[in-house]
Amino acid sequence: MIGRSDVVFLNGLDFFTDAVVRLRASDWDRPSPCSGWRAVDVLGHVGSAVRFGTKLLQDDNPAWEPADPPGSAVEGDPGSWWTTLVGPAREAVSGVDLARVVESPMGRRTIGEGLSFPALDLFVHAWDLGRVIDVDVEIPLEAIEFAHAVIDPIPAEQVRSPRVFATELTPPPDATPTQRFVAWTGRDPRWAPVA
């Protein structure tokens, strides 16, 4: 059985936090596997989505205004900025009614549906941050299965776009489940930082 989106999201917060704390201050300006984004842009993208979702769950009716570049959303020390977002997000998601319908940038949807993509995003972007510092982050199989359950039913033309995933790549023959998964998201599983 595929996990509930709230549980996957809460686990993803921990998983992403584990990646964030590995980076030193000098690492945040390094390139990431996301084309044109530095590590701080990955963090800004994820953090902005988490902050938006938290406000949405608190019935704040926030406007979705992504920063460009995403890293410009990060205020002060990146690790500390992320930490300030995690507590409120946990509180907003814990015990939430997944069947409740809310207005979102994607139209009216249940909270369970709305949490699904941000939940899987936390795992994918934790891998991105790991690669920034040449660390192999292994994504749990449950998160990979959850991602496929969320994404596979969506038409390919909606998934393979600049806003979601790039064209699927071919993983190496000896690829791990994580490497196969990130290749499916359009990332090069052998991506490495420039020395």
Image (cartoon, rainbow, N blue to C red):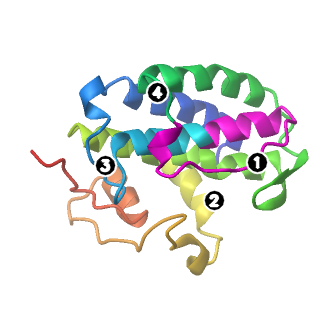
Q: Which amino acid, mark 4?
A: Thr
Residue under pointer 1: 63
Amino acid type at circle 3 is Ser
Distance in Å between CA atoms under marks 3 and 2 = 25 Å
- In-image side of 194 versus 143 (left or right): left
Q: Do the residues labelled 3 and 2 touch (CB within 8 Å)?
A: no
Which quadrant does the C terminus fall into?
top left
Label 4, secondary structure: give it: helix
- Tell which of 77 and 138 is nearer to you: 77
Give the amino acid type for the residue marked by disc 1 in the picture. Ala
Label 2 belongs to which residue?
A: 150
| Label 4 crowd (10 A; few <14 / some 14-19 / many >=20) | some
If you read the primary sequence from the N terminus, does the residue marked by circle 3 or circle 1 appear first? 3
| The furthest residue to the left | 195
Where does label 3 land, which residue? 32
At x 75%, y 53%, the residue is 113
The magenta region covers 49-73
State which quadrant residue 85 falls in: top right
The image quarter in which residue 185 lies: bottom left
Q: How far apart are marks 2 and 1 (CA)?
A: 25 Å
Q: What element carries label 2?
A: helix
Marks 1 and 4, how far apart in space? 25 Å
Residue 65 within the magenta-colored segment of the rendering: yes
Q: Which of marks 4 and 3 is in front?
A: 3
Secondary element under disc 1, as helix, strand or loop, is: loop
Q: Can you tell which of label 2 and label 1 is closer to the viewer? A: 1
Which one is closest to the eye, mark 3 or mark 1?
A: 1
Of marks 1 and 4, the one in the foreground: 1
Q: Can you identify the residue that label 4 sits on?
A: 17
Residue shown at 27% from the left, 57% from the top:
189
Magenta span includes 142: no
Give the alpha-carbon distance from disc 3 to disc 1, as whole Å. Answer: 27 Å
